[in-house]
Image (spheres, rainbow, N blue to C red):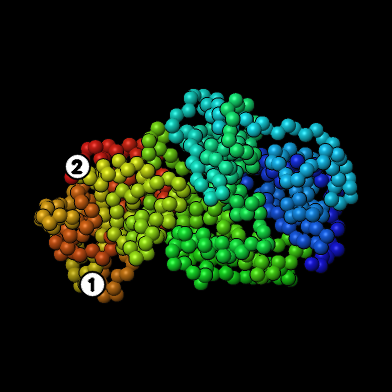
Amino acid sequence: MKRSASWAKVEVPQKAVAAVNSNPKETLTHVGQKRLCRGLLKGDLVYTTVETGSGYIATCSFSQELSSTLNIHEAIIGAVAPTKKAAEHNAASTVLSMLGVESEPNTKRTKGPTNSATAQSFVGGAPKLQAPQKAAAAVNSVPKETLAHTAQKRCGRGLVKGDVVYTTMETGSGYVATCSFSEEVSGTLGIYEAIIGAEAPTKKAAEQDAASSVLSLLGIESEPNTKQIKGPTSSAPAQSFVGGAHGGIAITDDGEFDGTEDYKGLLLRQLQTLFSGLSETDLIYTTQPSGPASASWQGCVQIPCLEEMSTYKPSWSPVPSSGEIVSKKKSMQFSAFAALRTLSTGLRPILPPQSHVVPRRAKNSPCQVFALFKPRGMTTTMSTDPLKGGRDMAAWINSIMPGLKLCIIGGLDKFASGLLLVTSDGHLAQDMAACHGCEKEYWCGVDVASDVDADALVSDTCSLLLGGFEIDHPHKEIKMFASAKEARQLLPEEQAHAGLGEGAGAQDQRLLFSVTVDIGSFQTVKRMMDAAGAPPVTQHLERIGSLRLADLQLRKPGTHIELSGEDVELLRSSCASGQVA
Protein backbone atom coordinates (compact mmCIF):
# COMPACT_ATOMS: atom_id res chain seq x y z
CA MET A 1 0.00 0.00 0.00
CA LYS A 2 1.34 3.40 -0.92
CA ARG A 3 2.14 5.62 2.03
CA SER A 4 2.42 9.38 2.07
CA ALA A 5 5.70 10.99 3.08
CA SER A 6 4.10 12.36 6.24
CA TRP A 7 4.80 9.11 8.07
CA ALA A 8 8.50 9.98 8.22
CA LYS A 9 7.88 13.44 9.68
CA VAL A 10 7.64 12.43 13.32
CA GLU A 11 8.72 15.45 15.31
CA VAL A 12 9.17 13.65 18.63
CA PRO A 13 12.59 12.03 19.11
CA GLN A 14 12.47 8.30 18.44
CA LYS A 15 14.02 6.36 21.28
CA ALA A 16 15.24 2.88 20.73
CA VAL A 17 12.82 -0.01 20.94
CA ALA A 18 12.84 -1.62 24.36
CA ALA A 19 14.32 -5.06 24.76
CA VAL A 20 12.32 -8.08 23.59
CA ASN A 21 11.14 -8.86 27.12
CA SER A 22 9.69 -5.37 27.84
CA ASN A 23 6.04 -4.34 27.45
CA PRO A 24 5.64 -0.59 26.72
CA LYS A 25 1.90 -0.98 26.02
CA GLU A 26 1.30 -2.44 29.47
CA THR A 27 3.45 0.24 31.10
CA LEU A 28 1.59 2.99 29.25
CA THR A 29 -1.73 1.48 30.37
CA HIS A 30 -0.56 1.51 34.00
CA VAL A 31 0.62 5.12 33.67
CA GLY A 32 -2.75 6.14 32.22
CA GLN A 33 -4.65 4.35 34.98
CA LYS A 34 -2.58 5.90 37.76
CA ARG A 35 -2.82 9.42 36.38
CA LEU A 36 -6.58 9.14 35.77
CA CYS A 37 -7.07 7.38 39.14
CA ARG A 38 -9.36 4.81 37.47
CA GLY A 39 -9.35 1.89 35.06
CA LEU A 40 -9.10 2.73 31.38
CA LEU A 41 -12.33 2.68 29.39
CA LYS A 42 -12.89 1.83 25.75
CA GLY A 43 -11.47 4.65 23.62
CA ASP A 44 -9.13 6.02 26.29
CA LEU A 45 -6.10 4.45 24.61
CA VAL A 46 -6.37 3.42 20.94
CA TYR A 47 -3.73 1.81 18.71
CA THR A 48 -4.16 1.85 14.93
CA THR A 49 -1.74 -0.14 12.75
CA VAL A 50 -1.12 0.11 9.00
CA GLU A 51 1.16 -1.80 6.65
CA THR A 52 3.92 0.22 4.96
CA GLY A 53 5.37 -2.35 2.57
CA SER A 54 8.53 -2.77 4.62
CA GLY A 55 6.73 -3.48 7.87
CA TYR A 56 4.08 -1.92 10.08
CA ILE A 57 3.60 1.49 11.66
CA ALA A 58 1.26 2.12 14.58
CA THR A 59 -0.24 5.29 15.97
CA CYS A 60 -1.34 5.79 19.56
CA SER A 61 -4.21 8.19 20.24
CA PHE A 62 -6.12 9.12 23.39
CA SER A 63 -9.53 10.16 24.63
CA GLN A 64 -9.98 13.86 25.44
CA GLU A 65 -9.71 13.22 29.18
CA LEU A 66 -6.56 11.10 28.95
CA SER A 67 -5.06 13.47 26.38
CA SER A 68 -5.46 16.38 28.79
CA THR A 69 -4.14 14.34 31.72
CA LEU A 70 -0.99 13.28 29.83
CA ASN A 71 -0.71 16.67 28.08
CA ILE A 72 -0.39 14.96 24.70
CA HIS A 73 -2.88 16.46 22.28
CA GLU A 74 -2.10 14.54 19.07
CA ALA A 75 -1.75 10.98 17.84
CA ILE A 76 1.81 9.67 18.27
CA ILE A 77 3.44 7.56 15.57
CA GLY A 78 5.92 4.83 16.43
CA ALA A 79 8.84 3.41 14.49
CA VAL A 80 8.52 0.84 11.68
CA ALA A 81 8.40 -2.74 12.97
CA PRO A 82 8.18 -6.20 11.39
CA THR A 83 4.90 -7.12 13.16
CA LYS A 84 1.72 -5.29 14.15
CA LYS A 85 2.27 -6.02 17.82
CA ALA A 86 5.84 -4.73 17.78
CA ALA A 87 4.67 -1.58 15.96
CA GLU A 88 2.15 -0.88 18.71
CA HIS A 89 4.85 -1.35 21.33
CA ASN A 90 6.98 1.14 19.42
CA ALA A 91 4.16 3.68 19.46
CA ALA A 92 3.67 3.13 23.21
CA SER A 93 7.44 3.42 23.76
CA THR A 94 7.46 6.76 21.92
CA VAL A 95 4.66 8.06 24.17
CA LEU A 96 6.55 6.87 27.25
CA SER A 97 9.69 8.64 26.08
CA MET A 98 7.69 11.88 25.81
CA LEU A 99 6.44 11.34 29.36
CA GLY A 100 9.88 10.46 30.68
CA VAL A 101 8.66 7.01 31.77
CA GLU A 102 10.50 3.75 31.20
CA SER A 103 8.62 0.55 30.36
CA GLU A 104 8.41 -2.22 32.90
CA PRO A 105 9.63 -5.76 32.13
CA ASN A 106 7.20 -8.24 30.69
CA THR A 107 6.99 -11.71 32.19
CA LYS A 108 5.34 -13.26 29.14
CA ARG A 109 7.69 -15.57 27.24
CA THR A 110 8.12 -14.76 23.57
CA LYS A 111 8.34 -17.41 20.92
CA GLY A 112 11.83 -18.20 19.70
CA PRO A 113 15.22 -17.39 21.23
CA THR A 114 15.96 -13.97 22.67
CA ASN A 115 19.22 -12.12 22.32
CA SER A 116 20.89 -10.80 25.43
CA ALA A 117 23.09 -8.52 23.39
CA THR A 118 22.24 -4.88 23.00
CA ALA A 119 18.79 -4.65 21.43
CA GLN A 120 18.63 -2.68 18.19
CA SER A 121 15.91 -0.28 17.16
CA PHE A 122 13.70 -1.14 14.18
CA VAL A 123 14.57 2.31 12.84
CA GLY A 124 18.26 3.03 13.11
CA GLY A 125 19.97 0.34 15.10
CA ALA A 126 20.12 2.56 18.18
CA PRO A 127 21.10 0.93 21.47
CA LYS A 128 18.46 -0.13 23.95
CA LEU A 129 17.31 2.03 26.85
CA GLN A 130 19.96 1.99 29.57
CA ALA A 131 17.62 2.42 32.54
CA PRO A 132 17.76 -0.51 35.01
CA GLN A 133 14.89 -2.90 34.54
CA LYS A 134 12.79 -3.79 37.59
CA ALA A 135 12.49 -7.47 38.32
CA ALA A 136 9.24 -9.10 37.24
CA ALA A 137 6.91 -10.38 39.94
CA ALA A 138 7.57 -13.98 40.84
CA VAL A 139 5.17 -16.62 39.57
CA ASN A 140 4.49 -17.73 43.14
CA SER A 141 3.10 -14.34 44.29
CA VAL A 142 -0.43 -14.23 45.77
CA PRO A 143 -2.26 -11.09 44.60
CA LYS A 144 -5.53 -12.22 46.25
CA GLU A 145 -3.87 -12.45 49.66
CA THR A 146 -2.14 -9.09 49.19
CA LEU A 147 -5.41 -7.47 48.12
CA ALA A 148 -7.20 -8.91 51.17
CA HIS A 149 -4.49 -7.56 53.49
CA THR A 150 -4.65 -4.16 51.80
CA ALA A 151 -8.44 -3.95 52.14
CA GLN A 152 -8.27 -5.01 55.80
CA LYS A 153 -5.67 -2.36 56.64
CA ARG A 154 -7.51 0.42 54.85
CA CYS A 155 -10.91 -0.52 56.32
CA GLY A 156 -9.44 -0.97 59.80
CA ARG A 157 -11.20 -4.32 60.31
CA GLY A 158 -11.29 -7.89 59.09
CA LEU A 159 -13.10 -8.63 55.85
CA VAL A 160 -16.54 -10.23 55.91
CA LYS A 161 -18.38 -12.16 53.23
CA GLY A 162 -19.32 -9.89 50.36
CA ASP A 163 -16.51 -7.36 50.91
CA VAL A 164 -14.32 -8.78 48.11
CA VAL A 165 -16.09 -11.06 45.60
CA TYR A 166 -14.53 -12.99 42.73
CA THR A 167 -16.71 -14.27 39.89
CA THR A 168 -15.17 -16.59 37.30
CA MET A 169 -16.54 -17.57 33.89
CA GLU A 170 -15.24 -19.94 31.24
CA THR A 171 -14.33 -18.43 27.87
CA GLY A 172 -13.74 -21.57 25.84
CA SER A 173 -9.97 -21.12 25.82
CA GLY A 174 -9.56 -20.49 29.54
CA TYR A 175 -11.11 -18.50 32.37
CA VAL A 176 -11.69 -14.84 33.14
CA ALA A 177 -12.44 -13.54 36.63
CA THR A 178 -13.89 -10.28 37.91
CA CYS A 179 -13.27 -8.70 41.30
CA SER A 180 -15.99 -6.54 42.87
CA PHE A 181 -16.41 -4.96 46.28
CA SER A 182 -18.99 -4.07 48.90
CA GLU A 183 -20.02 -0.42 49.03
CA GLU A 184 -17.80 0.24 52.06
CA VAL A 185 -14.66 -1.35 50.61
CA SER A 186 -15.37 0.26 47.24
CA GLY A 187 -15.45 3.70 48.86
CA THR A 188 -12.33 2.98 50.94
CA LEU A 189 -10.25 1.80 47.95
CA GLY A 190 -11.68 4.39 45.59
CA ILE A 191 -12.63 1.73 43.01
CA TYR A 192 -16.29 2.04 42.11
CA GLU A 193 -16.62 -0.66 39.47
CA ALA A 194 -15.98 -4.36 38.96
CA ILE A 195 -12.46 -5.10 37.65
CA ILE A 196 -11.77 -7.87 35.17
CA GLY A 197 -8.44 -9.66 34.94
CA ALA A 198 -6.61 -11.31 32.08
CA GLU A 199 -7.55 -14.71 30.68
CA ALA A 200 -5.91 -17.62 32.50
CA PRO A 201 -5.81 -21.41 32.11
CA THR A 202 -7.42 -22.11 35.51
CA LYS A 203 -10.09 -20.52 37.68
CA LYS A 204 -7.61 -19.94 40.49
CA ALA A 205 -5.11 -18.25 38.20
CA ALA A 206 -7.90 -16.08 36.73
CA GLU A 207 -8.85 -14.85 40.20
CA GLN A 208 -5.20 -14.07 40.92
CA ASP A 209 -5.07 -12.05 37.68
CA ALA A 210 -8.17 -10.08 38.68
CA ALA A 211 -6.63 -9.31 42.08
CA SER A 212 -3.38 -8.34 40.36
CA SER A 213 -5.30 -5.92 38.14
CA VAL A 214 -6.83 -4.28 41.22
CA LEU A 215 -3.42 -4.03 42.87
CA SER A 216 -1.99 -2.37 39.76
CA LEU A 217 -4.70 0.28 40.05
CA LEU A 218 -3.73 0.82 43.69
CA GLY A 219 -0.01 0.90 42.85
CA ILE A 220 0.75 -2.09 45.10
CA GLU A 221 3.00 -5.08 44.40
CA SER A 222 1.85 -8.54 45.51
CA GLU A 223 3.59 -10.36 48.36
CA PRO A 224 5.45 -13.64 47.86
CA ASN A 225 3.55 -16.88 48.20
CA THR A 226 4.79 -20.34 49.07
CA LYS A 227 1.88 -22.02 47.30
CA GLN A 228 2.47 -22.99 43.69
CA ILE A 229 -0.12 -21.77 41.21
CA LYS A 230 -0.83 -24.09 38.32
CA GLY A 231 -0.37 -22.53 34.92
CA PRO A 232 1.05 -19.14 34.01
CA THR A 233 -0.34 -15.91 35.38
CA SER A 234 -0.53 -12.57 33.69
CA SER A 235 0.00 -9.04 34.93
CA ALA A 236 -2.27 -7.59 32.28
CA PRO A 237 -3.70 -4.17 33.05
CA ALA A 238 -6.97 -3.86 34.90
CA GLN A 239 -10.08 -3.67 32.80
CA SER A 240 -13.43 -2.22 33.81
CA PHE A 241 -16.93 -3.52 33.19
CA VAL A 242 -18.08 0.07 32.79
CA GLY A 243 -18.18 1.37 29.25
CA GLY A 244 -16.85 -1.80 27.55
CA ALA A 245 -13.16 -1.61 28.41
CA HIS A 246 -10.48 -3.40 26.39
CA GLY A 247 -9.13 -6.69 27.65
CA GLY A 248 -11.05 -9.52 29.24
CA ILE A 249 -11.94 -12.31 26.87
CA ALA A 250 -9.65 -12.06 23.87
CA ILE A 251 -11.22 -12.07 20.45
CA THR A 252 -7.93 -13.24 18.96
CA ASP A 253 -4.90 -14.76 20.67
CA ASP A 254 -3.63 -11.31 21.70
CA GLY A 255 -7.02 -9.56 21.81
CA GLU A 256 -6.15 -7.31 18.86
CA PHE A 257 -7.82 -6.68 15.52
CA ASP A 258 -6.72 -9.14 12.84
CA GLY A 259 -7.42 -8.09 9.27
CA THR A 260 -7.69 -11.72 8.16
CA GLU A 261 -10.56 -12.57 10.53
CA ASP A 262 -14.27 -12.45 9.61
CA TYR A 263 -15.57 -10.55 12.64
CA LYS A 264 -18.98 -10.04 11.03
CA GLY A 265 -19.48 -13.79 10.89
CA LEU A 266 -18.12 -14.25 14.41
CA LEU A 267 -20.48 -11.60 15.78
CA LEU A 268 -23.46 -13.30 14.13
CA ARG A 269 -22.51 -16.70 15.60
CA GLN A 270 -22.04 -15.16 19.07
CA LEU A 271 -25.48 -13.55 18.94
CA GLN A 272 -27.08 -16.76 17.67
CA THR A 273 -26.10 -18.40 20.97
CA LEU A 274 -28.44 -15.89 22.66
CA PHE A 275 -31.06 -15.48 19.93
CA SER A 276 -31.79 -18.65 18.00
CA GLY A 277 -33.03 -18.03 14.47
CA LEU A 278 -31.02 -14.81 14.10
CA SER A 279 -29.85 -14.22 10.52
CA GLU A 280 -27.47 -11.84 8.75
CA THR A 281 -30.33 -9.52 7.86
CA ASP A 282 -31.01 -8.96 11.58
CA LEU A 283 -27.70 -7.06 11.88
CA ILE A 284 -27.67 -3.66 10.17
CA TYR A 285 -24.31 -2.41 8.86
CA THR A 286 -23.84 1.14 7.58
CA THR A 287 -20.79 3.21 6.60
CA GLN A 288 -19.97 6.89 6.35
CA PRO A 289 -16.87 8.94 5.44
CA SER A 290 -14.66 9.56 8.47
CA GLY A 291 -14.30 13.21 7.51
CA PRO A 292 -15.39 15.81 4.92
CA ALA A 293 -12.31 15.33 2.75
CA SER A 294 -11.24 11.90 3.95
CA ALA A 295 -10.87 8.80 1.80
CA SER A 296 -11.35 6.60 4.88
CA TRP A 297 -14.61 5.20 6.15
CA GLN A 298 -16.22 4.51 9.49
CA GLY A 299 -18.52 1.53 9.96
CA CYS A 300 -21.48 1.03 12.29
CA VAL A 301 -23.43 -2.08 13.27
CA GLN A 302 -26.91 -1.92 14.79
CA ILE A 303 -28.32 -4.92 16.68
CA PRO A 304 -32.10 -4.40 16.94
CA CYS A 305 -32.68 -7.52 19.03
CA LEU A 306 -30.60 -5.94 21.81
CA GLU A 307 -31.79 -2.37 21.31
CA GLU A 308 -35.42 -3.43 21.78
CA MET A 309 -34.61 -4.74 25.25
CA SER A 310 -32.43 -1.93 26.61
CA THR A 311 -30.39 1.19 26.04
CA TYR A 312 -27.75 -0.70 24.07
CA LYS A 313 -26.26 1.59 21.43
CA PRO A 314 -24.83 0.80 17.96
CA SER A 315 -21.10 -0.03 17.76
CA TRP A 316 -18.89 2.23 15.65
CA SER A 317 -15.47 1.51 14.24
CA PRO A 318 -12.66 3.80 15.52
CA VAL A 319 -11.95 7.08 13.72
CA PRO A 320 -9.00 6.44 11.35
CA SER A 321 -5.83 8.29 12.28
CA SER A 322 -4.37 10.95 10.00
CA GLY A 323 -3.03 9.44 6.78
CA GLU A 324 -4.69 6.06 7.25
CA ILE A 325 -7.03 4.72 4.59
CA VAL A 326 -9.77 2.37 5.81
CA SER A 327 -12.04 0.85 3.18
CA LYS A 328 -15.80 0.42 3.59
CA LYS A 329 -15.38 -3.34 3.91
CA LYS A 330 -12.71 -3.06 6.59
CA SER A 331 -14.68 -0.40 8.51
CA MET A 332 -17.60 -2.82 8.83
CA GLN A 333 -15.23 -5.50 10.14
CA PHE A 334 -13.94 -2.92 12.64
CA SER A 335 -17.49 -2.18 13.82
CA ALA A 336 -18.23 -5.92 14.25
CA PHE A 337 -14.97 -6.23 16.19
CA ALA A 338 -16.05 -3.32 18.43
CA ALA A 339 -19.41 -5.03 19.07
CA LEU A 340 -17.65 -8.28 19.97
CA ARG A 341 -15.48 -6.36 22.42
CA THR A 342 -18.60 -5.01 24.08
CA LEU A 343 -20.27 -8.42 24.21
CA SER A 344 -17.25 -10.29 25.53
CA THR A 345 -15.33 -7.93 27.83
CA GLY A 346 -17.75 -7.05 30.54
CA LEU A 347 -20.32 -4.52 29.43
CA ARG A 348 -23.59 -6.40 29.18
CA PRO A 349 -25.43 -4.79 26.29
CA ILE A 350 -28.85 -5.97 27.42
CA LEU A 351 -28.51 -3.85 30.56
CA PRO A 352 -28.09 -0.08 30.91
CA PRO A 353 -24.71 1.25 32.13
CA GLN A 354 -26.27 2.56 35.39
CA SER A 355 -26.72 -1.03 36.55
CA HIS A 356 -22.94 -1.50 36.87
CA VAL A 357 -22.07 1.48 39.09
CA VAL A 358 -21.23 0.26 42.62
CA PRO A 359 -23.57 -2.76 42.82
CA ARG A 360 -25.51 -2.88 46.08
CA ARG A 361 -24.19 -6.26 47.14
CA ALA A 362 -25.93 -8.24 49.86
CA LYS A 363 -23.24 -8.23 52.55
CA ASN A 364 -23.14 -11.31 54.80
CA SER A 365 -25.96 -12.86 52.76
CA PRO A 366 -25.54 -16.37 51.32
CA CYS A 367 -27.47 -15.39 48.22
CA GLN A 368 -27.78 -12.64 45.66
CA VAL A 369 -31.12 -11.13 44.66
CA PHE A 370 -31.67 -8.84 41.68
CA ALA A 371 -34.67 -6.61 41.02
CA LEU A 372 -35.66 -6.26 37.34
CA PHE A 373 -38.08 -3.87 35.65
CA LYS A 374 -39.69 -6.30 33.19
CA PRO A 375 -40.96 -4.68 29.99
CA ARG A 376 -44.29 -5.58 28.40
CA GLY A 377 -44.17 -8.21 25.68
CA MET A 378 -41.42 -10.30 27.32
CA THR A 379 -42.39 -13.81 28.42
CA THR A 380 -41.29 -14.68 31.96
CA THR A 381 -39.44 -17.92 31.33
CA MET A 382 -35.86 -19.19 31.37
CA SER A 383 -36.57 -21.31 28.30
CA THR A 384 -34.57 -20.42 25.18
CA ASP A 385 -37.16 -22.02 22.90
CA PRO A 386 -38.74 -19.28 20.69
CA LEU A 387 -41.87 -21.44 20.36
CA LYS A 388 -42.38 -21.06 24.12
CA GLY A 389 -41.86 -17.32 23.94
CA GLY A 390 -38.46 -17.56 25.58
CA ARG A 391 -35.00 -16.33 24.57
CA ASP A 392 -35.22 -12.65 25.55
CA MET A 393 -35.76 -13.20 29.29
CA ALA A 394 -33.14 -15.97 29.44
CA ALA A 395 -30.58 -13.82 27.60
CA TRP A 396 -31.24 -10.87 29.92
CA ILE A 397 -30.98 -12.86 33.16
CA ASN A 398 -27.91 -14.82 32.01
CA SER A 399 -26.16 -11.55 31.16
CA ILE A 400 -26.62 -10.12 34.67
CA MET A 401 -23.98 -12.35 36.22
CA PRO A 402 -22.52 -14.82 33.70
CA GLY A 403 -21.79 -18.21 35.23
CA LEU A 404 -24.17 -17.66 38.16
CA LYS A 405 -27.33 -19.79 38.11
CA LEU A 406 -30.30 -17.51 38.73
CA CYS A 407 -33.97 -18.45 39.08
CA ILE A 408 -37.08 -16.31 38.81
CA ILE A 409 -39.18 -15.59 41.91
CA GLY A 410 -42.85 -15.69 40.92
CA GLY A 411 -43.69 -14.36 37.49
CA LEU A 412 -45.61 -11.87 35.37
CA ASP A 413 -47.80 -12.32 32.32
CA LYS A 414 -46.24 -11.60 28.94
CA PHE A 415 -48.14 -8.33 28.50
CA ALA A 416 -47.68 -7.21 32.10
CA SER A 417 -44.78 -5.00 33.16
CA GLY A 418 -43.21 -4.33 36.52
CA LEU A 419 -41.06 -5.63 39.35
CA LEU A 420 -39.55 -9.09 38.91
CA LEU A 421 -37.08 -10.72 41.30
CA VAL A 422 -34.38 -13.26 40.42
CA THR A 423 -32.05 -14.94 42.89
CA SER A 424 -29.20 -17.41 43.21
CA ASP A 425 -30.91 -18.93 46.27
CA GLY A 426 -33.40 -21.59 45.21
CA HIS A 427 -34.74 -21.95 48.77
CA LEU A 428 -35.64 -18.26 48.93
CA ALA A 429 -37.42 -18.54 45.57
CA GLN A 430 -39.44 -21.53 46.79
CA ASP A 431 -40.31 -19.85 50.10
CA MET A 432 -41.57 -16.70 48.41
CA ALA A 433 -43.53 -18.63 45.78
CA ALA A 434 -45.27 -20.64 48.50
CA CYS A 435 -45.82 -17.68 50.82
CA HIS A 436 -49.12 -15.94 51.56
CA GLY A 437 -48.84 -12.63 53.36
CA CYS A 438 -46.28 -10.78 51.24
CA GLU A 439 -48.09 -7.74 49.83
CA LYS A 440 -48.07 -7.03 46.12
CA GLU A 441 -49.35 -3.79 44.64
CA TYR A 442 -50.71 -4.09 41.10
CA TRP A 443 -51.62 -1.16 38.86
CA CYS A 444 -54.42 -1.86 36.37
CA GLY A 445 -55.83 0.17 33.50
CA VAL A 446 -59.54 -0.14 32.67
CA ASP A 447 -61.16 1.34 29.54
CA VAL A 448 -64.70 2.69 29.90
CA ALA A 449 -66.95 4.77 27.66
CA SER A 450 -66.30 8.50 27.79
CA ASP A 451 -69.87 9.21 28.97
CA VAL A 452 -69.54 6.99 32.07
CA ASP A 453 -69.38 8.69 35.49
CA ALA A 454 -65.73 7.91 36.27
CA ASP A 455 -65.85 8.95 39.94
CA ALA A 456 -68.86 6.74 40.68
CA LEU A 457 -67.35 3.78 38.81
CA VAL A 458 -64.04 4.10 40.69
CA SER A 459 -65.82 4.30 44.04
CA ASP A 460 -68.05 1.28 43.32
CA THR A 461 -65.18 -0.83 41.95
CA CYS A 462 -62.91 -0.12 44.93
CA SER A 463 -65.71 -1.00 47.35
CA LEU A 464 -66.34 -4.32 45.60
CA LEU A 465 -62.61 -5.17 45.57
CA LEU A 466 -62.30 -4.46 49.30
CA GLY A 467 -65.41 -6.55 50.00
CA GLY A 468 -63.96 -9.53 48.12
CA PHE A 469 -65.22 -12.27 45.79
CA GLU A 470 -65.35 -16.03 45.57
CA ILE A 471 -63.33 -16.78 42.44
CA ASP A 472 -61.72 -19.77 40.71
CA HIS A 473 -58.33 -20.77 42.10
CA PRO A 474 -55.65 -20.05 39.47
CA HIS A 475 -54.02 -23.50 39.85
CA LYS A 476 -56.60 -25.77 41.46
CA GLU A 477 -60.15 -26.79 40.55
CA ILE A 478 -61.61 -25.17 43.66
CA LYS A 479 -63.11 -21.85 44.67
CA MET A 480 -61.23 -19.35 46.79
CA PHE A 481 -62.15 -16.09 48.52
CA ALA A 482 -60.01 -13.11 47.61
CA SER A 483 -60.22 -9.48 48.65
CA ALA A 484 -58.02 -6.43 48.26
CA LYS A 485 -56.17 -5.03 51.27
CA GLU A 486 -56.24 -1.66 49.54
CA ALA A 487 -57.96 -0.40 46.39
CA ARG A 488 -57.78 3.16 45.09
CA GLN A 489 -57.38 5.27 41.98
CA LEU A 490 -53.79 6.09 41.03
CA LEU A 491 -52.51 9.51 42.00
CA PRO A 492 -51.89 11.99 39.14
CA GLU A 493 -48.09 11.72 39.56
CA GLU A 494 -48.34 7.91 39.34
CA GLN A 495 -50.51 7.75 36.24
CA ALA A 496 -47.75 8.50 33.72
CA HIS A 497 -45.61 5.69 35.11
CA ALA A 498 -45.08 2.41 33.20
CA GLY A 499 -47.08 3.55 30.16
CA LEU A 500 -50.40 2.36 31.57
CA GLY A 501 -52.31 5.01 29.62
CA GLU A 502 -50.98 3.91 26.22
CA GLY A 503 -53.41 2.41 23.70
CA ALA A 504 -56.64 3.90 25.02
CA GLY A 505 -59.31 4.26 22.36
CA ALA A 506 -60.34 7.69 21.10
CA GLN A 507 -63.92 7.18 22.32
CA ASP A 508 -62.90 5.76 25.68
CA GLN A 509 -61.38 6.98 28.91
CA ARG A 510 -58.86 4.90 30.84
CA LEU A 511 -59.20 4.61 34.59
CA LEU A 512 -56.11 3.52 36.51
CA PHE A 513 -56.42 1.53 39.73
CA SER A 514 -53.98 0.46 42.45
CA VAL A 515 -54.95 -2.92 43.94
CA THR A 516 -52.93 -4.38 46.84
CA VAL A 517 -53.32 -8.07 47.72
CA ASP A 518 -51.43 -10.50 49.95
CA ILE A 519 -52.49 -13.69 48.21
CA GLY A 520 -52.16 -15.08 44.71
CA SER A 521 -50.71 -13.57 41.55
CA PHE A 522 -51.88 -11.16 38.92
CA GLN A 523 -54.27 -13.83 37.64
CA THR A 524 -56.03 -13.48 41.02
CA VAL A 525 -56.21 -9.70 40.66
CA LYS A 526 -57.42 -10.01 37.08
CA ARG A 527 -60.27 -12.34 38.17
CA MET A 528 -61.20 -9.91 40.96
CA MET A 529 -61.30 -6.98 38.52
CA ASP A 530 -63.41 -9.03 36.10
CA ALA A 531 -65.83 -9.93 38.92
CA ALA A 532 -66.10 -6.22 39.84
CA GLY A 533 -67.14 -5.42 36.26
CA ALA A 534 -63.84 -3.64 35.42
CA PRO A 535 -61.73 -6.00 33.27
CA PRO A 536 -58.12 -4.66 33.05
CA VAL A 537 -56.47 -3.95 29.68
CA THR A 538 -53.06 -3.00 31.08
CA GLN A 539 -51.25 -4.58 34.03
CA HIS A 540 -48.21 -3.55 36.06
CA LEU A 541 -46.63 -4.81 39.31
CA GLU A 542 -45.19 -1.82 41.18
CA ARG A 543 -44.39 -3.24 44.62
CA ILE A 544 -43.49 -6.52 46.35
CA GLY A 545 -43.43 -6.17 50.13
CA SER A 546 -41.36 -3.09 50.91
CA LEU A 547 -39.62 -3.11 47.50
CA ARG A 548 -41.00 -0.49 45.12
CA LEU A 549 -39.63 0.16 41.64
CA ALA A 550 -39.42 3.92 42.18
CA ASP A 551 -37.53 3.49 45.48
CA LEU A 552 -35.05 1.17 43.75
CA GLN A 553 -34.43 3.87 41.09
CA LEU A 554 -35.74 1.51 38.40
CA ARG A 555 -37.70 3.91 36.22
CA LYS A 556 -37.26 2.37 32.76
CA PRO A 557 -38.23 -1.11 31.51
CA GLY A 558 -35.18 -3.29 30.88
CA THR A 559 -33.14 -2.04 33.87
CA HIS A 560 -32.03 -3.95 36.95
CA ILE A 561 -30.17 -3.55 40.25
CA GLU A 562 -28.77 -5.90 42.87
CA LEU A 563 -30.54 -5.67 46.21
CA SER A 564 -28.71 -4.61 49.36
CA GLY A 565 -28.40 -6.91 52.35
CA GLU A 566 -31.06 -4.88 54.13
CA ASP A 567 -33.52 -5.33 51.27
CA VAL A 568 -32.85 -9.08 51.16
CA GLU A 569 -33.51 -9.40 54.89
CA LEU A 570 -36.78 -7.48 54.49
CA LEU A 571 -37.79 -9.96 51.80
CA ARG A 572 -36.96 -12.88 54.08
CA SER A 573 -38.91 -11.40 56.99
CA SER A 574 -41.95 -10.81 54.76
CA CYS A 575 -41.84 -14.48 53.77
CA ALA A 576 -41.41 -15.58 57.36
CA SER A 577 -44.38 -13.48 58.50
CA GLY A 578 -46.65 -14.89 55.82
CA GLN A 579 -48.46 -18.21 55.69
CA VAL A 580 -47.29 -21.08 53.54
CA ALA A 581 -49.82 -22.22 50.96
Q: Residue at x 26, y 51 (%)?
A: 441
How dense is the environment of label 2, judged by Cα within 10 Å: few (below 14), some, or many (20 and up)?
few
Q: Is residue 432 left or right of residue 165?
A: left
Q: Secondary structure at mark 2?
A: strand
Q: Pointer 2: what residue?
A: 580
Q: Residue at x 62, y 38 (%)?
A: 232
Whichever of callouts 2 and 1 sits on the residue coming sooner in the sequence is 1
- Classify residue 238 by image quadrant: top right
The kind of residue tagged 2 is Val
Q: Quadrant of the N terminus?
A: bottom right
Q: Quadrant of the C terminus?
A: top left
Q: Residue at x 28, y 63 (%)?
A: 538
Q: Measuring from the top left, give residue 36's x and y in whole percent.
A: 65, 42
Q: Nearer the viewer, residue 87 or 466?
A: 87
Q: Secondary structure at mark 1?
A: loop
Q: Nearer the viewer, residue 407 or 32?
A: 407
Task: Give the answer, above or below, for where 567 lies relative to 390.
Answer: above
* Disc sitting over residue 177 in the figure: none
Q: Nearer the viewer, residue 416 or 396?
A: 396
Q: Pointer 1: what residue?
A: 450
Q: Measuring from the top left, give residue 454's x and y in whole percent.
A: 20, 65
Q: Residue at x 86, y 51 (%)?
A: 123
Q: Is residue 498 left or right of residue 66?
A: left
Q: Nearer the viewer, residue 581 or 557?
A: 581
Q: Is residue 113 left or right of residue 266?
A: right
